[in-house]
Amino acid sequence: MAATRHASARTRRRRRLFRQPLARYLAILMPDLVDPLIPLSLLEAVRTVDLPDNDFEAEFVHELRNKRLGLSDTVFAQIKRFTEAVRRKQRTDLAEAAGIARLIGRRSDAEAVFRESGRYFARQVYGTISPLTRRMMRALPTLLTRPLALRHLRRVARRYLHGSARRTGGSIMLDVTESVTRDAAPKLAGCAYYESALRELLHLMVGGVGAVEHVRCASRGEGTCEWRAEWRPHRGKG
């Protein structure tokens, strides 16, 4: 009888294993690969920040291509390549993504670019949630929307960020074990990518977010990077 119970337990564990999303196990088995949306979001932000600010600059766009990385043919080609990789769900080298982050880190406006990258990332992954679920998260009472939002945040953390998300009291904790932007820029500016992504994603899902703090950082020798966000319901919710 004991042997039968052990065999049944093994069978159940195997079934649970194969029911889990494939991306979760790809992240475990291939830690040196990342989702191509990460480098794509970095490059898209560079292009957005480097776009001409006014009509006068727009007249000299050809000359600006030699001065602004985001307007270069190289960045355009890389954006096209990573866009196709996202469409095909082909994971890419973590080292390549980290190299793009370090290139951004040399800029004087690096933190602004990382924040724009995080917002782009959040908008893209929010778009993968079904329209019905998005409406429910905005319309239902907070008691119902928070568990729903947390479930999707956990999926995003596993699928895209090499991380995990959990709720602690009135806060959400995002823990990232393999940060693409770690040490990419002075003064931990690269960490703004994940902070911005978490803030924007919570804002899109539940309509409000409070303070977002970087409570632990691998660059400070603290193991992993972790952020704490206070989520707030959309006005009018109970």
Image: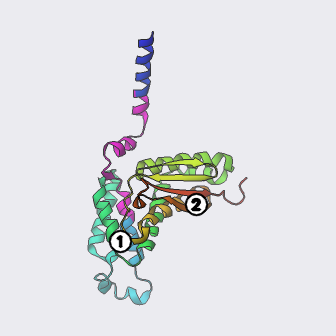
Q: Residue at x 30, y 81 (%)?
A: 65
Mark 1, residues whose alpha carbon is within 10 Å: few (<14), some, or many (≥20)? many
| Badge number at residue 144 | none
Q: Earlier in the sequence, mark 2 or mark 1?
A: 1
Specify the quadrant of the image occupied by residue 1: top left
Q: Is residue 134 left or right of residue 115?
A: right
Q: Tell me the element at label 2.
A: helix
Q: Residue at x 40, y 32 (%)?
A: 17
Amino acid marked by disc 2: His
Question: In the orientation shown, which residue stands out farthest toward the top?
Answer: 1
| Badge number at residue 203 | 2
Q: Residue at x 48, y 59 (%)?
A: 122
Question: Between 128 and 153, which is closer to the camera in this rendering?
Answer: 153
Q: Residue at x 37, y 73 (%)?
A: 47
Which segment did they paint magenta?
14-41
- Residue 53 appears anywhere in the view: yes
Question: In the orientation shown, which residue stands out farthest toward the front?
Answer: 221
Identify residue for label 1: 104
Q: Is residue 88 left or right of residue 238?
A: left
Looking at the picture, does residue 183 appear above or below residue 146? below
Q: Which SS does the magenta portion mostly show?
A: helix
